[in-house]
Amino acid sequence: MSAKNVVVSLELGHRATVRKQRVGTDMYTHDWEIYIHGVCGSRVDAFIEKVIFTLHKSFPKPRRVLKSPPYRVCEKGYGSFTLPVEIYFRTTNPNDTRKTQIEYDLFLQNINCPPINNKRIEKFTFLKPSEEFKRLLLQGGGVSIVTFIVL
């Protein structure tokens, strides 16, 4: 017996640079951005409905909801923190995976260090997605795989 599954890859990462100059009482030391996008330019908006980045509570409006690409938040700050990143998928079938959450460590470099360009690839395997959702996943760069089940 075999099942057709789909694997998608997303690049999740952040960039950070030390600010050249601060004005007056500005305590922010870094400019940074966090992002999610497709690997090798794949159009992940085909299967992503929205991405929610929940920043540290010290930021104004810390819950950032992005319903179209680019899925990124650019900010300024002075400290590192861990944030949840929620990815919602475009599916109407209740049997399909609706969302996933990743904890991301947004860290900043010391003042005298070079810029940070941190990224990682997250792979998601969707087990037997509905035909509609499978089509969207493949359109967005997903790869169909066959899994053999031994009984």
Image (cartoon, rainbow, N blue to C red):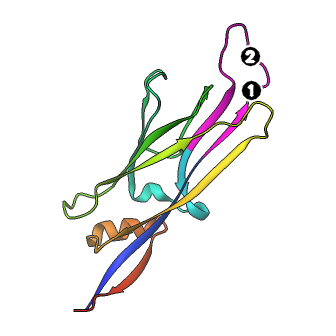
Q: Which of the 4 image quadrants contains residue 66?
A: top left
Q: Which of the 4 image quadrants contains residue 138?
A: bottom left
Q: Nearer the viewer, residue 89 or 17?
A: 17
Q: Could you say where residue 7 lies in the image, as x and y percent from the top left?
A: 43, 71
Amino acid type, residue under disc 1 in the picture: Arg
Secondary element at tag 2: loop
Q: Residues within 10 Å of mark 2 (few under 14, many from 20)?
A: few
Q: Given the current orientation, which residue lies at the most extreme left position? A: 94
Which residue sits at x=57%, y=62%? 39
**Is 4 one of the magenta-colored residues?**
no
Q: Which residue is mark 2?
A: 22
Span of residues in magenta = 14-34
Secondary element at tag 1: loop
Q: Which residue is mark 1?
A: 19
Q: Is residue 113 left or right of residue 42?
A: right
Q: Could you say where residue 142 lies in the image, as x and y percent from the top left?
A: 45, 70
Amino acid type, residue under disc 2 in the picture: Arg
Q: Is residue 22 above or below residue 100?
A: above
Which residue sits at x=54%, y=45%? 70
Which residue sits at x=31%, y=66%? 133
Callout 1–callout 2 Cβ contact below 8 Å: yes
Q: Is residue 13 above or below residue 56?
A: below
